Amino acid sequence: MSHKHQTLGEFIIENQAAFKYSSGELSRLINSIRLAAKVVNHEVNKAGLVDIIGAAGETNIQGEDQQKLDVLANDKFIQTLTNRNIVCGIASEEEDDFISINSQDENNQNKYVVLIDPLDGSSNIDVNVSVGTIFSVYRRVTPVGTPVTIEDFLQKGNQQVAAGYVVYGTSTMLVYTTGAGVNGFTLNPAIGTFYLSHPNMEFPLDGNIYSVNEGNYIHFPQGIKDYIKYCQKEEGDRPYTSRYIGSLVSDFHRNMIKGGIYMYPKCSPKTNGKLRLLYECNPMAFLAEQANGKASDGYTRIMDIQPTELHERVPFLCGSRNMVEKAEEFIQLADPK
Ligand code: P6P
């Protein structure tokens, strides 16, 4: 089939056979994410018109104000994945604990768990800046037909079978991998169909964009400070351009297309940065590596880190391979572990 104008549905069917666990269950899982993405996209795009902007009056486990769209996106993804009886468990940034699906039904032969950040960057909603959904998929490690346990969720990122994001931007895109490269699909809202618009996405090995919240500069580890000064120095192809819009999915997406590095370092001795390992860093790291990029905490490959709790945070560097490796050099020179 000509890939020109291939739809996401056609792409999933065509590539299902290539996926080693091609039971069709993962295809149905990606299809359910596609449906939920369309529903959330519709709500995000009309947010300015109806009363769903603004905090839902509650805070999540992160202590962050829950925006109404956060709550709606969370509910929609959980509802879609649950109703279609595809997964045995879900973990979400917006849920304190993981959710066990149909655990009473010993016929529940579902073998996948999904971890999601339903609406990342939601503080941008009220100011009309792009936001995104991030998802990560694993095969369960406990016996099929039994209720999931925390160990089904605390798997290393190198065990992921799929990962991706939806970016609700000037156009809405679904970008995902099942371990055979990264492909981007753009939604035609007029007919509600995703079309393959960015086949085989790859990070350029080098880039000249660095993305970091420099408002935290004085709190950064010395190696990060040294790397930022390297980016700003008048030398060779530098200074680089600073681009940071406060939405990981959007900064990542731009850097993957143009070349660049995204950093969310430790900002104080007692914290480990802001980004969550399980449903932000691991899925973005899987995508980065599948797109010939790199993701680490400055010392260790993100996908080799053994998680110890559902909402744990890690320092995060991600993007063009040569840029991440240069940043790691500065970090390890300033503070060899
Ligand atoms: P700060 C959004 O809350 C998020 O998780 C990422 O999408 C974004 O890159 C980062 O946090 C922004 O955090 O502290 O720079 O506002």
Image (cartoon, helix red, strand yellow):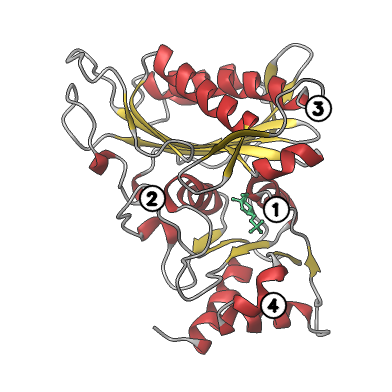
Amino acid type, callout 1: Gly
Between the residue at mark 3 and the residue at mark 2, the CA separation in whole angstroms equals 36 Å
In what element is the residue under mark 1? Answer: loop
Between the residue at mark 4 and the residue at mark 3, the CA separation in whole angstroms equals 36 Å
Q: Which residue is pictured at 56% across the width and 68% down the height?
A: 265
Between the residue at mark 1 and the residue at mark 4, the CA separation in whole angstroms equals 18 Å
Between the residue at mark 3 and the residue at mark 1, the CA separation in whole angstroms equals 19 Å
Question: Is ligand 1 closer than 8 angstroms to the Cβ of mark 1?
Answer: yes
- Give the residue pinned by disc 2: 157
Tag in front: 4 or 3: 3
Q: Earlier in the sequence, mark 2 or mark 1?
A: 2
Tag in front: 2 or 4: 4
Quarter of the image where the C terminus is located: bottom left
Q: Earlier in the sequence, mark 3 or mark 1?
A: 3
Q: Earlier in the sequence, mark 3 or mark 2?
A: 3
Position of residue 211 measured from the top left corner of the image (x, y, whole percent): 70, 62
| Above or below, 332 relative to 116 | below
- Give the residue pinned by disc 1: 246
Position of residue 272 measured from the top left corner of the image (x, y, whole percent): 46, 66
In what element is the residue under mark 3? Answer: loop
In-front residue for pair 110/277: 277
Q: Earlier in the sequence, mark 2 or mark 4?
A: 2
Between the residue at mark 2 and the residue at mark 1, the CA separation in whole angstroms equals 24 Å
Question: Is ligand 1 closer than 8 angstroms to the Cβ of mark 2?
Answer: no
39 with respect to 162 (left or right):
right
Tag in front: 3 or 2: 3
Position of residue 246 measured from the top left corner of the image (x, y, whole percent): 70, 53
Question: Is ligand 1 closer than 8 angstroms to the Cβ of mark 4?
Answer: no
Q: Earlier in the sequence, mark 4 or mark 3?
A: 3
- Give the residue pinned by disc 3: 48
- Give the residue pinned by disc 4: 228
